[in-house]
Amino acid sequence: MSNLNKYQFGWTRSNYDEYANEQSPEDEPLHISWHHADGPHGFGPEVPSDRDYGAVVEEVRDSVTRNRDIPHRKDPKYGYNYSRLAHVQEYEGIQEAADSMNTGNPVRIDNHNLIENLYSKRPNFPRTFPTADRAKYVAELLIKRRDARIPLTPRRRGQ
């Protein structure tokens, strides 16, 4: 696992989600910001295998008061202050797609949603976290395990 120390995530805070959308007006008075893993070059985290990943963590804070009634955004465990994994994916074919722009032959980019994979294998894993740093740690761990080909769940004995 010595390669796990060679990862560079370079988290940056933004007012835009992974699709360049801003906070919705119906979420006021909550303040929502997103943390993007941009790496040292601004194109996603840098990993030893040179595979392409994207990661975004959503951070929700009550900017006015905790007594506001916003039921569609309230998390029962952390109230109005929590973070969640918004986007953690591996992309395949990005370099091929960039190279194909000169030839005019489009190449498909496949993605593997690491969040869906996590919750399908571990349905009781927390979906929200008390801080953005904890959610970033989980996103980083998902990418590191995927890149190092370490499964999320142990294999059964005898298989």
Image (spheres, rainbow, N blue to C red):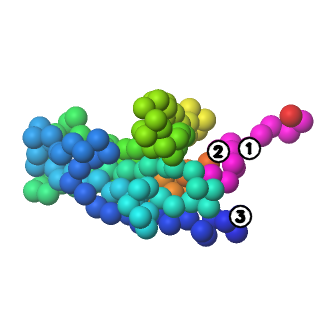
Q: Which mark is residue 1?
A: 3
Q: Residues within 10 Å of mark 2 (few under 14, many from 20)?
A: few
Question: Which residue is depicted at the point 25% across and 57% down?
Answer: 14
31 left or right, relative to 17: left
Above-or-below relation of 57 to 1: above
Which quarter shows the N terminus?
Answer: bottom right
Sequence order check, earlier mark of 1 and 3: 3
| 24 to the left or right of 83 | left
The majority secondary structure of the magenta stretch comes to loop
Given residues 18 and 67, the one toward you in this image is: 18
Helix, strand or loop at label 3? It is: loop
Q: Which mark is residue 78?
A: none
Tell me the amino acid under the disc marked 1: Pro
Would you place residue 62 above or below residue 103 in this image? below
Label 3 Cα neighbours within 10 Å, binned few <14 / some 14-19 / many ≥20: few
State the residue position of label 2: 152
Q: Disc 1 and disc 2: Cα gap in Å? A: 7 Å
Residue at the spot 40% in from the left edge and 44% down from the top edge: 87
Q: Which residues are magenta?
A: 147-158
**Front: mark 1 or 3:** 3
Q: Is residue 96 visible?
A: yes
Q: Which residue is mark 1?
A: 154
Q: Quadrant of the C terminus?
A: top right
The disc labelled 2 sits on which kind of residue?
Leu
Distance between mark 1 and mark 3 Cα atoms: 16 Å
Residue 134 placement, left or right of 62: right
Q: Can you give x and y, in whole percent of width and height, for residue 92 in the image?
A: 54, 40
Which of 21 and 41 lies nearest the eye of the viewer? 41
How far is mark 2 from mark 3, CA to CA?
A: 15 Å
Q: Position of residue 98 (x, y in %)?
A: 45, 43
